[in-house]
Amino acid sequence: MRCSSFLLALVSSAAILLPAVARGAEPKSSPAGAASATRLERIAASQRLRVCIWPDYYGITYRNPKTLMLSGIDIDMAHALGKDLGVAVEFIDSSFARLIDDVTGERCDIAMFAIGITPQRAEKLRFTRPHLASDIYAIVARSNRRIQQWGDIDKPDSVVAVAKGTLHEPVMREKLKAAQLLVVDTPFAREQEVHSGRADVFMTDYPYSQRFLANADWARLVAPPTTYHITPYAYAMKPGDDGWYARVERFVSDIKRDGRLREAARRHKLETILAP
Amino acid sequence: MTAPGTRQLQRTYLVALLLFVGGMLAITAYTVKTLRAEAIASGFERSSVHARGFEDLLTQSLHAAHYLTASVLAHKTATTDPEALQAALDTILRRTPFLRSISLLDEDGRIFISTNPANLGLTPATDTFLPLAANNPDVLRIGPPWTGRDFASGASTSHRAPASTDALGFVPVAQQLHVGERTLFLLLAFNPGYFVNQFAERLEDEQGLVDVLRYDGTLLMSSGHDRPPGSREEATIRRIDESGSATGRFKNLDTDSGHLSAFRVSRLYPFVVVTHIDRKHALGPWRTATRTLLSIVAPALLAVILLAAHFLRRQLARAAERTEFERLQRINATLFDACAEATLITGSDLRVISVNPAFTGVTGYPPEEIIGRHLFDFLDEKGIATFKNAPPPNEKEQAPARLEVQLRGKNGEPFWMEILATPEPPQRRERAGYRRIARNITARKQSEEKIRLAASVFTHAREGIFITDEVGTIIDVNDAFCQISGFAREEAIGNTPRLFRSERHGKAFYSTMWRELKENGFWHGEIWNRHKSGKLLAEILTISAVRDERGRARQFVALFTDITRLKEHEHELEHIAHFDALTGLPNRVLLADRLNQAMTQSQRHGTSLAVAFLDLDGFKAVNDTHGHEIGDRLLIIVATRMKLTLREGDTLARLGGDEFIAVLLDLAHVDGQLPTLTRLLDAASQPVHVGDLTLQVSASLGVTFFPQANEVDADQLVRQADQAMYQAKLAGKNRYRVFRTDDKGTGCAKDAATEAATEGETEPAPRPPARPT
């Protein structure tokens, strides 16, 4: 309990500090955008908001492969932002591996897919205050008799799969002592490794695990008994545009205050990970 | 009901109940048994379906892996371009989660290409793979399960050293392939977890488990947690062998609860899938159904038994009640028949229902002549009118309404009946009415008449009547009592007869009265009582004691008649008989009485008495001269004067006319009487004033004494005195002469007396004329 409150404090301070760090980095990249019109003006002019999403993110920004319909809390929030700005929303497929490039390369105006605020990302991107915060969870095959609880994971014979570019990669690299870390290119690959028995578990966050378990009947969840590593999730933008940042920050504060965030979280069963 | 009857009823009930309960139990047992058989059959069916499904899955998977790999290798560039081959195998692996790795062995048995780089260069032993390669090297061969993640880190198991149940493992499968000129071995590491997951998904742990056996009985994989891969399931495989069939089922009773097992031999490859459905689990629905059935049947049966018991008890109670009712009815009927009181019962329609023998006895109507007939047939017009005019009986009153009417017997003789109407609640198809019971009250009527008469006598009698209790307190009086005694009814009641007692009777009188009453229960006599005003009343009183059944006097009835006037009259009569009407002096009768009494007294006390005979001289002349009225008045005055000269106790009587006799008592000696005699003569000779007349007479007096030497009686004494008076007359009147027995003897005196009497009547003596004064 003490541990978890400590971590929460850490997360909160990170949420406050990181934008400051990002701001600190601003001057380096600002000359390029200073001459051009602000992003808000451009959005208003083009009448569209380009939002980067990761279409495999269950519960957050998920595209159903059969219907191609998008759903998730951040799909709802992106629409809400577009509505607030009075423009249409255009979703751009991205991923955690391509996140920084897509945002800084201005493929999109904002990345909205519950991006975990990690120091590596914070160096390149500017985050809003967090709207969600999730711990790390493990997914294991039902038939796996060796791993029954969290403590069984970090053992010499175990193989732990993570997707490249996700926040889990650096976290697990740091945390695992005995088990072998298997970094695979895609989230699908890590599932495939576990399903075929080449890996024992793969690491994911709360929203992904919930939606994944709902669809894969061969898998089961192994949850940490206490707080393991809580990561705050936020929206990311290219640094250097204070007006845009302030607008999005106001939007986040609005959705938190007026209940739109909570309502969407309730709809997507994510109330438990709403950021404080 | 009799005891045997009760037992019979109980036995019938018991048998019926047993039959019912037994039948129900039999039906239930049959149902339960059928359901159980169905559940077992269904369990086997499920087992078979799963075995078929899983065999299909495994065969398809193996076939797919073999086919995909073979098709890749069939490509011309397969052996010439190792990188392309590697990429092709990786692609296959991504699509086949049931494969851990795909490797290719060269002719030397060394892995030269593998999806898992760690496997490269290894020479896994394939000689234990079955079927053995010697006969047909091109068939798919299955090795014993390995532990570990892949060949690189794994080791083969054997029957003696099977894998641990929770260890990571895989099943190696080898297939000889001819690629171009080369003969290669495809070595696949099958991921048992994939299939176990599939099994577990469709057949949860508690429902049963799935084993996959190589055809020699080696356990390749199992969804059971306690079944180590690599061990040999000898019994099972023998059973399958014996069946000689590709599919089948058997009961596996190795475990505690037993399994419903089914197997299916792969149609392509050397393995068999065996499913074991947990018998206990398969019987679960049956158990639930049985419990439900029993939970319905058991309470229902219990309820039926309880109801039956309750019903039986009620039947028995009713039977007992009926018996008791019949017994009471018999008693009532007997009572009714034996009842001495003539009784008739009608229904609410007034038609006769029943009569008892006493009724027949009184009226002469036998039951068959009267039952069913209308009550009015036996009433006269007056009776019918009485009946019809009677107020309707009040239903709220408990007591039946009563009517008294006269009925006529068969011979026309009337008799009184009292009719009681008892409300009767409505019966089937009948309105509520009144049941009527009539009983003979003729005797009572007669008795009432008697009482009425007696009361009338009491009230209207001319005799005074009062009734007291045993101690004499008056409890009732009649009108005549009040009229005679002057006391009001209220004054008399509560008092005793002392209220009107007079002082005319001494204590002795009353005590005698009480004694007689007590002894004889009766007293009759005359009594003096006192009227309320104080005047005396003479009564003839009769007191009768009213005795109770033990003979004790409880009440006294006293009748009396007022005889006061009668008494007064009697007194008058008595006076007339003994006294002279003119002078009021005792007459001859009383004189005789008194003289006799005096003689008795004189003899008793030894005293003497004198008898003096007086005759007035010259009275006849007064009578003749002045008339009888004057004469009478003279006589009254002279007699009064003469009486005054005598002492108390002496008697002066008038014999008639002018003759008097005086009886003088208690003489000490005879001579002592002479002054008295002289006074008598003087008194007679004193002048008498009658009106204006002054008259004077005298008297001649003869006296004799008693006792005498000879015994004499009263008559003799009077004759002697008369004789002596005669002598005095002769001697010149106005004098007296004493009779002397010694002078002339008894005979002489007697004679002389007779003479004198004769003379006196025939020859009146000369008298001096009356002198006026």
Image (cartoon, grey):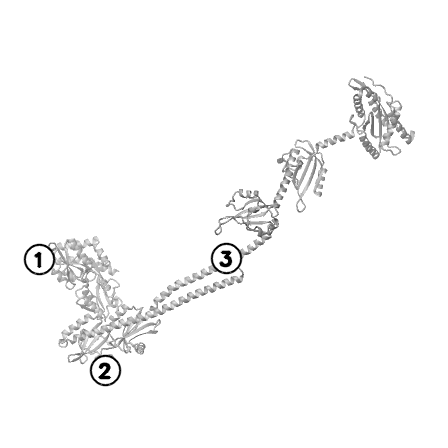
Q: Judging from the image, what secondary structure is the residue with disc 1 in? A: helix
Marks 2 and 3 sit apart, C-alpha to C-alpha, by 95 Å
* Pointer 1 chain: A
- Badge 2 element: loop
Residue found farthest to the left: A35
Do badges 2 and 3 share one subunit? yes
Q: Is residue B102 above or below residue B353?
A: below
Nearest the eye: B370 or B268: B370
Residue B255 in percent (x, y) is at: 34, 73
Tag 1 and tag 2, C-beta contact below 8 Å: no
Q: Quadrant of the C terminus of chain A?
A: bottom left
Residue marked by disc 3: B318
Q: Chain of mark 2?
A: B
Could you say where residue A93 lies in the image, as x and y percent from the top left? 15, 62
> Which quadrant of the structure image shows residue B276?
bottom left
Which sits earlier in the primary sequence, circle 2 or circle 3?
Answer: 2
Among the 4 quarters of the image, the one containing residue B721: top right
Is residue B262 visible in the rendered image? The answer is yes
Marks counted in the figure total: 3
Quadrant occupied by the N terminus of chain A: bottom left
Specify the amino acid type for callout 1: Pro
Q: Nearer the viewer, mark 1 or mark 2?
A: 2
Q: Position of residue B133 (x, y in %)?
A: 22, 81
For this view, does B204 lie left or right of residue B524?
left
Residue kind at label 2, given as amino acid type:
Asn
Which element is circle 3 on? helix
C-alpha gap between disc 1 and disc 2: 80 Å
Disc 1 marks which residue? A31
Q: Position of residue A108 (x, y in %)?
A: 13, 59
Reading the image, the residue beneath label 2 is B135
